[in-house]
């Protein structure tokens, strides 16, 4: 009996110690803090507790007496970066059985232990929209992930129940990628026709459900693809649409106007040619920049000024990696290219943080440093746009999840295929990511 009492007492002491550790605040002070939604704070103080931001302010900010203090003089703090379009995680989406596969979930194919997640952390990315490929008109459901370490994919989701909650968006594409042999469309016009037909079918399916008025005997047969499409029609699932050429962009805007779905334009290489039309439609753009020639013919007119033109037009603009098209470790470089092309510094920082969070409906939790938001941030060695700057630490929900000073973490910042064997195998077998 005494042994049992002692054991339970010890367990109680351990539990109390853990609770006390969780309740204790962490203070990072002395750095230049970019909150993104407010003015930069020199010699700032960031206080986090229980995974949330308690406050962010100047050096005079009151600090809890029992807080764990991290001295960061000479450093720069940014919100955790948000990547609106990536293919990390080793997943794959639809097959070649049809051009439209809204029932497919990338969620079911992502490996939470994949090395590519550590690569993203090395680049300061804390939130990511993982996509199926763009070789289909509709390749399936994307998934929004918080890159916290977890044994299962459920531990990385923003929602608690992926069967009943919306865990991501819907990937669509037009242009050359989804054109092919039957059952895929052979032309751009047929691509648009097939997409329209799917939306019309979904509207009819919705009408049958409404006509049944809850009577199970009158309900239409359950169809997983139509259930996903109803989420798109209701605006609960955002369409992330791969498109490049200006005429393809206009085709997407035409479809969106007809069916009223929520939309984020992805890539939009020639958005600068139709920036007014995009702005008038009030559609956000997630763009990509590359620093060397190559890729597909329809992206030949890509330039660094694209972001600046969109920003000036009033379009909500963000950058993405499309990893492995560009490397997650170099995501901040995309913002630097934006500045080189004429974007404002503030606009470029917003384009990898809060703007992207808005495109994923996650700006209430991530994308800026503000009291009440998730304590996701990174510590930089210097100016965010300098080629000499490194991500030194990445924090998610108040916990340090990557540290460049640790050898096991450092290798993910500088390593190649020897560090990422899974990615090497995928590239060798599948010819890379679409």
Image: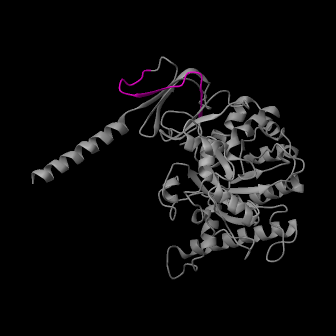
Q: Could one spot residue 20 in this view of the protein?
A: yes
What percent of the width, then of the height, locates residue 142? 63, 59
Residue at x-position 74% and y-position 47%: 285
Whether 162 is drawn above or below 8: the answer is: below
68 drawn magenta:
yes
Left or right of 124 on screen, residue 244: right
The residue lying toward the viewer, choosing from 254 and 148, is 148
What percent of the width, then of the height, locates residue 65? 36, 23
Location of the C terminus by quadrant is bottom right
Mark count = 0
What percent of the width, then of the height, locates residue 215? 49, 77
The colour scheme applied to this rendered structure is: one colour
What percent of the width, then of the height, locates residue 81? 62, 41
Residue at x-position 32% and y-position 41%: 19
Left or right of 267 on screen, residue 231: left
Instruction: Give the residues drawn in magenta, as a range.
Output: 62-78
The residue lying toward the viewer, choosing from 329 and 317, is 329
Location of the N terminus by quadrant is bottom left
Residue at x-position 49% and y-position 33%: 371
């Amino acid at each position: 009996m005494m042994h049992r009492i002692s054991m339970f007492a010890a367990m109680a002491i351990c539990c109390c110690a853990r609770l006390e550790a969780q309740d204790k605040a962490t203070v990072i002070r002395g750095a230049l803090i970019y909150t993104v939604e407010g003015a930069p704070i020199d010699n700032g103080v960031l206080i986090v507790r229980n995974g949330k931001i308690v406050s962010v302010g100047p050096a005079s900010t009151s600090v809890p007496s029992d807080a764990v203090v991290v001295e960061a003089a000479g450093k720069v703090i940014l919100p955790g970066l948000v990547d609106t379009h990536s293919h990390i995680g080793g997943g794959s989406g639809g097959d070649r059985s049809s051009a439209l596969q809204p029932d497919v979930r990338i969620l079911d194919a992502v490996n939470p232990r994949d090395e590519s997640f550590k690569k993203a952390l090395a680049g300061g990315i804390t939130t990511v929209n993982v996509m199926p490929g763009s070789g289909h008109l509709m390749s399936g459901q994307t998934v929004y992930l918080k890159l916290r370490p977890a044994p299962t994919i459920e531990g990385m989701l923003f929602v608690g129940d992926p069967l009943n909650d919306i865990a991501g968006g819907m990937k669509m594409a037009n242009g050359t990628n989804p054109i092919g042999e039957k059952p895929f469309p052979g032309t751009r016009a047929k691509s648009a026709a097939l997409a329209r037909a799917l939306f019309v079918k979904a509207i009819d399916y919705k009408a049958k459900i409404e006509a049944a008025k809850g009577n199970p005997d009158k309900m239409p047969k359950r169809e997983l693809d139509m259930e996903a499409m109803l989420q798109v029609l209701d605006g609960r699932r955002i369409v992330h649409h791969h498109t490049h050429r200006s005429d393809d962009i206009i085709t997407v805007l035409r479809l969106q106007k007809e069916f009223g779905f929520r939309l984020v334009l992805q890539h939009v290489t020639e958005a600068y040619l139709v920036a007014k039309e995009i702005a008038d439609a009030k559609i956000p753009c997630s763009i990509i920049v590359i620093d060397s020639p190559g890729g597909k013919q329809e992206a030949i007119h890509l330039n660094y000024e694209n972001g600046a033109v969109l920003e000036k037009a009033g379009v909500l603009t963000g950058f993405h990696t499309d990893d492995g098209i560009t490397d997650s470790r170099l995501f901040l470089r995309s913002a630097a290219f934006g500045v080189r092309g004429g974007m404002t510094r503030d606009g470029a920082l917003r384009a990898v943080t809060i703007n992207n969070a808005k495109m994923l409906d996650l700006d209430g939790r991530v994308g800026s440093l503000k009291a009440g938001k998730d304590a996701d941030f990174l510590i930089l060695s210097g100016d965010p746009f300098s080629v000499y700057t490194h991500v030194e630490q990445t924090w998610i929900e108040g916990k340090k999840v990557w540290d460049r000073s640790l050898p096991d973490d450092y290798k993910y910042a500088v390593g190649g295929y020897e560090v990422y064997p899974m990615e090497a195998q995928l590239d060798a077998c599948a010819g890379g990511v679409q």
